[in-house]
Image (cartoon, helix red, strand yellow):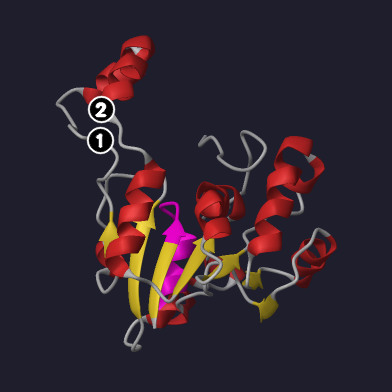
Amino acid sequence: MKILVVSIFSQHFFNWILQLKNTKHEIYWIDVFDSNTYVHKIDFVGQKVKWKYKWDYPGRQTVKKHFPSLNSHINRFNERNFFDVFNKVVEKFQPDVIQSFELHSGCSSIIDFMEKRKDLKWIYSAWGNDLFYYKNEANKLKNIKRVLKRLDYMFADCSRDYKIASDLGFNGYYLGTFPGGGGYDLAYTNPMVLDFNEKKTILIKGYEHNLGGALTY
């Protein structure tokens, strides 16, 4: 099967897709926001990265940080349109199915295309606050319902989100409740599990804003 993955640059996605390593599936990934980075961890996957800028000129990050008005003006001519790039990837790769990770970047970015291509199967992998949090925002809810109506299949982190999706119009096939990050590499993590008297670090998860980020003290 040929699977075209639409996702942001994320460890959750990388760990999920590693489950398909050494299978017969042919996989291609398009980085929605283009982190400008090839990911060696998933080198068995075709990767559409470094597509956003026609010219990634020296000093671009400095201009972006210190001269935002100039950066916006340059980007009007220097940035490629994601939708155009996505269309070309589909035409060349000819996928059997598209799998989108996270609704508001992986699904909303291609909904116009997918509503026209009813012949192309579509899987949605829900993450965290996709539905539970954003269903309360009117401007997001309209698009959520539009996406859910078109989907053929769905994964979720928890059964709660499947129920929310069903209430909001999802009528496709539910593929099951699985960790959105594909689980954990126990061979890697188990050696880090220590007895209480051996522990030297206290790790606290925090939020600088609504959905993530934490300052380090």
Position in image of residue 41 (x %, y %): 29, 67
Main secondary structure found in the magenta portion:
helix
**Residue 27, picture quadrant:** bottom left
* Left or right of 166 in this view: 53: left
Identity of the residue furthest to the right in this view: 167
Q: CA distance from mark 2 to mark 1?
A: 6 Å
Which numbered dot is residue 53?
A: 1
Of residues 178 and 50, the one drawn nearer to the viewer in this rendering: 50
Q: Residues within 10 Å of mark 1 (few under 14, many from 20)?
A: some
Callout 1 amino acid: Tyr
Of residues 110 and 212, the one drawn nearer to the viewer in this rendering: 110
**Would you say residue 12 is visible in this rendering?**
yes
* Left or right of 11 in this view: 60: left
| Upstream in sequence: badge 2 or badge 1 | 1
Callout 2 amino acid: Asn
Which numbered dot is residue 78?
A: 2
**Would you say residue 130 is visible in this rendering?**
no
Position in image of residue 107 (x %, y %): 56, 54
- Secondary structure found at label 2: helix
Position in image of residue 15 (x %, y %): 44, 69
Residue 120 vs 216, above or below: the answer is: below
**Residue 47, picture quadrant:** bottom left
Figure quadrant of the N terminus: bottom left
Q: Which residues are magenta?
A: 6-18
